[in-house]
Amino acid sequence: MTALPSQITRLHFVASDRSEAQDARARLIARYGDCQETDAQVIVALGGDGFMLETLHRNLDDVRPIYGMNQGSVGFLMNEYSEDGLLDRINAAECAVIHPLVMRTVDRGGREDRALAINEVSLLRQTRQTAKLEISIDGKVRMHELVCDGLLVSTPAGSTAYNLSAYGPIIPIDARVLALTPISAFRPRRWRGALLSHTAKVALKVLEADKRPVSAVADNFEVRDVVTVHIAEDRDIRLRMLFDAGRSLEERVLAEQFSV
C-alpha cells in the first residue's frame, strides 16, 4: 500500500445532492479551502453510504484516500460529521484498503457486461416466480438447484449492508473471505449460505431463464435477464478509505457483531 503523506493539508470536497450535504460542503470550503481535485491529497466525501460508494466508483484508478463524513441516513462507511479539527482528524486517521468484486454477465440476448462491486453482487428474481440458480465454485458445481428470491456475494466491507439484512455473516475486514448468502431460500430451505476464500471464482447459472427471469446487480449497476454471472475479487484494485482514530472500519465491523 502507498503510504499516506507525512502531513496532509490539501483537501478536495465533494457532496451528495442533499441540501444538507451541499451546505456542509460550502461551510467546510470556507474554513479549509478547496484544492483542485488533481492537486488534493485527500478527497472528503459528504453524504451517506450510497454517496461514498459513488465516490469510490468514480475514483477506482486513484491512489488517493477518501475520508467520508456522514450527511446521509446510514453512514456506516462514514465518519461522524464535525467541522472542527478536520485536518488533525485526517492526519491521525486509520486507512482501510478494500478490493472490489468483478461481475461478468451474459444475458438472454447474448450481450456481455462487466461491472465492479464494492459492497456486493446480488441476483434477484424479476417476477413473482422464484429464481432457480446453479452454483459453481472454482469450476465445480456445489449446488445444482437453489430455489430462492435471490443470492448475493458480499465483500467484507459490504457484509454489514445488504448481506446482513439477508442474515448473512459479518466478516472482519482482513479476513480474506467472501460471503455467499441466499435471499429467502425456498429449497433447500435450511441452507444459510457459505463462506468462501477471497480467491474463489463464483459462477451462477440461471435455470429456466425464460420462465424465471433474474437480474444481476453490482452495487448500483443492474443487468436484467441474465443467464450466467461470474464473480471474482479483483486484487489489483486497491481502494483506500480513512477513518477516525479508534473508529476504524475493522473496529466498526467488530462492534456490529456485538450490537443487539
Image (cartoon, rainbow, N blue to C red):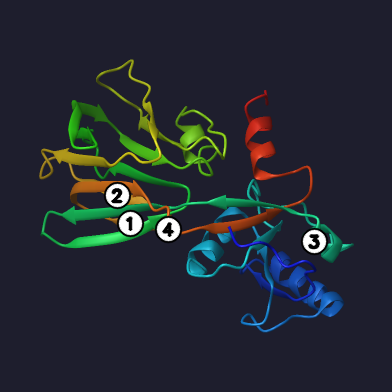
As drawn, is 102 to the left or to the right of 65?
A: left
Q: Residue at x 33, y 56 (%)?
A: 222
Q: Quadrant of residue 14?
A: bottom right
- Inspect the image, locate mark 3, and give the three-letter code of the amino acid beneath it: Asn
Mark 3: secondary structure: helix
- Pointer 3 or 1: first along the chain: 3
- Inspect the image, locate mark 4, and give the three-letter code of the amino acid beneath it: Asp
- Badge 4 crowding class, 10 Å Cα cut-off, few under 14, some 14 to 19, many 20 or more, is few
Mark 2: secondary structure: strand
Q: Residue furthest right?
A: 84
Mark 1: secondary structure: strand
Q: Could you give the CA–CA distance between mark 2 and mark 3, rounded to whole angstroms?
A: 39 Å
- Badge 3 crowding class, 10 Å Cα cut-off, few under 14, some 14 to 19, many 20 or more, is some
Q: Nearer the viewer, mark 3 or mark 1?
A: 3
The residue labelled by disc 1 is 222
> Which mark, residue 236?
4
- Inspect the image, locate mark 2, and give the three-letter code of the amino acid beneath it: Ala
> Which mark, residue 216?
2
Is the residue 214 above or below the residue 68 in the image? Answer: above
- Inspect the image, locate mark 1, and give the three-letter code of the amino acid beneath it: Glu
- Pointer 2 or 1: first along the chain: 2
Report the front residue among 102 and 52.
102
